[in-house]
Image (cartoon, rainbow, N blue to C red):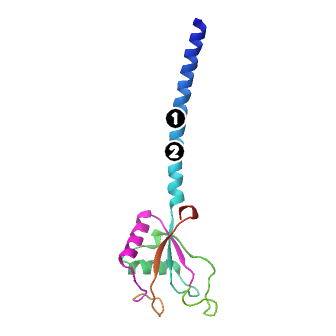
Amino acid sequence: MIATRLQVKLLNGSLAGLELRIDEADGNIEKLEARVGLLEGRHADKITNIPEEKGENLIHIVTTLTMKLSVMLSENDLVSATRVGRVNVSPETVPESHPSPKVVRLGRLALEDQVLIATLVRCGITTKGTWLPAPHRRFYVNERLMKVHR
């Protein structure tokens, strides 16, 4: 009888230790899931309605357009800038109203937020006053979210 009670006490102690380790592992998993969520949640900005040109410098176009939005970006702030979809550089293959969008990834989320807020404040902004060719047109900046976040 005493031996059984001692075994039950030891078993309860072992279970309590296992419960602490499981709780610790659950906490670590939650932290990792949060970090993965932040990394997956990083998004890019999408700039649309900018005409395509052969040999265009997307980084220069992006910095020029963000200056027009009163957000100063340097080339170091940009992680990448690419066109999405088929690149259409001949006037016969692209309707003037549908150039392919640019996807821009910035180094810091705070910069992405600044660009998006500036776009909302200055809705209706055009390419007038930039070196981009006429006709001047409105351009749009949107978040480009992953499918799971849409």
Q: Residue at x 52, y 54 (%)?
A: 37
Q: Is residue 71 visible?
A: no
Q: Residue at x 51, y 80 (%)?
A: 48
Residue extending farthest top: 1
Instruction: Check disc 1 and report its element: helix, strand or loop.
Output: helix
Residue 11 painted magenta: no
Q: CA distance from mark 1 to mark 2?
A: 11 Å
Residue 101 painted magenta: yes
In the drawing, does residue 24 fall left or right of residue 64? right
Q: Where residue 68 is drawn, which disc sits there?
A: none
Residue 103 placement (x, y as % from top left):
53, 73
Residue 85 placement (x, y as % from top left):
62, 77
Other-residue count near label 2 (Cα within 10 Å), few / some / many at <14 / 14–19 / ≥20: few
Q: Residue at x 59, y 6 (%)?
A: 1
Residue bearing mark 2: 30
Residue bearing mark 1: 23
* Residue type highlighted by circle 2: Glu
Range drawn in magenta: 99-128
Residue 44 placement (x, y as % from top left):
51, 68
In the drawing, does residue 138 fall left or right of residue 94? left
Choose the circle earlier in sequence order: 1 or 2: 1
Residue 109 placement (x, y as % from top left):
44, 63
Q: Residue at x 42, y 86 (%)?
A: 126
Other-residue count near label 1 (Cα within 10 Å), few / some / many at <14 / 14–19 / ≥20: few
Closest to the observer, 98 or 45: 98
Closest to the observer, 52 or 77: 52
Instruction: Check disc 2 and report its element: helix, strand or loop.
Output: helix
* Residue type highlighted by circle 1: Asp
